[in-house]
Image (spheres, rainbow, N blue to C red):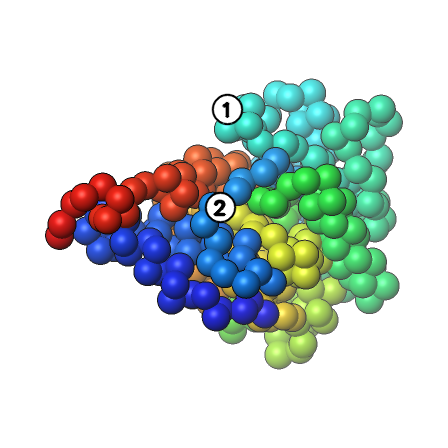
Amino acid sequence: MLDKSHSDAIWQKINNKTKPLGSLGKLEQVAHKLAMIQGQGKGDVVTKIKIKKPTVIVFAGDHGIAREGVSIAPQEVTQQMVKNFLAGGAAVNCFCRTNDVDLLVVDAGMVEPIKTDSSLLVEQRLGTSTENFAHKPAMTKEQVEQGLAFGDKIVKQVVDSGSNLIMFGEMGIGNTSSAAAILAALSRRSVEKCVGLGTGINDQQMRKKRQFVQLGVNRCRGQNVQEILRQVGGFEIAQMVGAFLAAEKYNTPVIVDGFIATAAAYVAAKINPACREYMIFAHQSHESGHKFMLQELAATPLFDLALRLGEGTGAVLAVPLIRSAAEFYNHMASFDQAGVEM
């Protein structure tokens, strides 16, 4: 839980900058959150926000539900895209290069492991694929527990390497079905509202997707949050849940990406509400259920670029805004310093 004893003093520092009160909008809220987090355990207000080695961790896993044809892409695309990440050819790679963000890829449980000596790939496999949650639980209790532990482990590794700003992305054909099922089961919203187009399915595939998601939701709605995660989640989602919980544990802000990452954030906040205070929400995805997920978390994202790609792309695109929030907090003159009267 964040110690908020310096909250008012941080706001006073922000409000005394040479600008009309509140005129930097969401950037002021970001600066306040970063100053609060970086001031934990210190006796006074943080005078400088430091952004060090921002890192996106992309978790990849395969889903049994994909075998029902709920995506336009075959399951093999999960592994193919991970190879693309490692080769530097995906959108997230482009945005990482543009914004000076480090990248790690976690094999959380793809059908086939990748043989590589790349330092970008971390093996934390929970299996070769989840089960088909339309017909049986996606994971065992042991897999969920191990997934949470793996998420903690990779965040600790990144924080220990010098990063103080992290992001989570994902890759997994079929994972919008899992995210939609988590949303419907936890929020009790209708499956019709929670299920979206994913990678761009047609009307017939949409009907099938809703049908299969409904089967999973019927089996677990009303149960506790970890059981819902076990029943309809994914290997990469479970590890992201553990990673969000770890962000609070290791006092590190985390930029939240789109629909799948927010589903993991939603689960994590249900397990430990204190981790919600460490989340900065990057964007509103155009995956239809994302707006409902944001409502459940009382989250106002920084922007809406009509994104629905995943990979952590939206989170990485938020990094310049985070850096800008730190810059104005650190270097914008106060009224007294500038000799300006308002």
Q: Residue furthest bottom?
A: 222
Amino acid type, callout 1 = Thr
226 w.r.t. 132: above or below = below
For the residue carrying disc 1, how many other residues have a C-alpha within 10 Å: few (<14), some (14-19), or many (20+)?
few
Tell me the residue at 85%/48% (across/down). Answer: 127
- Percent across and percent down for residue 84 are 67, 24
Q: Which residue is mark 1?
A: 98
**Could you tell whether 203 is left or right of 274 in the image?**
left
Q: Which residue is mark 2?
A: 49
- In the image, 40 versus 253, the foreground residue is 40
| Callout 1: SS | helix
| Callout 2: SS | loop
13 w.r.t. 317: above or below = below
- In the image, 208 versus 119, the foreground residue is 119
Tell me the residue at 63%/70% (across/down). Answer: 272
Tell me the residue at 38%/55% (across/down). Answer: 29
- Percent across and percent down for residue 326 are 43, 43
Is residue 177 among what the camera can see? Answer: no
Amino acid type, callout 2 = Ile
